[in-house]
Amino acid sequence: DSNKIHFKLRLHSAYSPGLYRNNLIIQTERGEERLKIDFEIPTIMEVRAGGDMNPNIKYSEGNFSQQIYSSGQSKLLIRANKAWTLKVNNEGGEDLEIKLKEFKGNGSVSNSRDEFIKIGKEAVIIAQGNKTTELPGGDAELIYVLRIDDFREIKAGQKDYQLNFIIE
């Protein structure tokens, strides 16, 4: 085992993904030995719930509008070590809309439309941003509200909407 060298590289999620090459210089009694080492930093892209992910959409008495909104705001956490795109789709395909805004991210979200966007079975882009791994905590926080534009077009009863958030 005298010819083996064991060492660890401490790689941080803030590093940009890719394949890196570097030289390892070993000083011995016979002089310097140079070894080429290759290492890869993987792409990190995560979207996860930032708390309660059960926004209820309820009709309330005294609502004189045809629109109904989710109760409260739900939070998403984005972690990425490169530029990212966030998409969402609704498996049920019902008429549902989403509005998203940056809550905490220090400008890491570069493109988020401040309007309600219809979501159906096909995934639609709702936000884009820069790497978040250098932010305090490493995450960008986004909040969203859901809306049904015209409740009269929805059949009565309880519905379970299956939203899928996809990060690329």
Image (spheres, grey):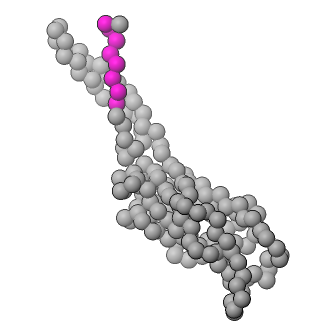
Describe residue 8's horizontal placement relative to residue 62 as left or right: left
Q: Does 88 appear in magenta?
A: no
Residue 117 makes an appearance in the image: no
Locate residue 45, reporting x and y percent: 50, 49
User: In which quadrant of the rendered view does residue 68 lie?
Assistant: bottom right
Establish if 79 lies above or below 65.
above
Q: Between 17 and 11, which is closer to the camera in this rendering?
A: 11
Q: How many marks?
A: 0
Establish if 67 lies above or below 26.
below
Residue numbers of the magenta segment: 2-9
Quarter of the N terminus within the rendering: top left
Residue at image point 32% right, 16% down: 5
Residue at image point 79% right, 80% down: 153
- Per the picture, the main secondary structure of the magenta-coloured stretch is loop
Residue 130 makes an appearance in the image: yes
Establish if 101 lies above or below 23.
below
Residue at image point 62% right, 75% down: 71
Establish if 92 lies above or below 157.
above
Locate residue 57, reporting x and y percent: 68, 75
Describe residue 118's horizontal placement relative to residue 126 as left or right: right
Residue at image point 60% right, 55% down: 166
User: In which quadrant of the rendered view does residue 119 lie?
Assistant: bottom right
User: In which quadrant of the rendered view does residue 167 lie?
Assistant: bottom right
Locate residue 47, reporting x and y percent: 54, 54
Q: Does 7 appear in magenta?
A: yes
Locate residue 151, reporting x and y percent: 75, 81
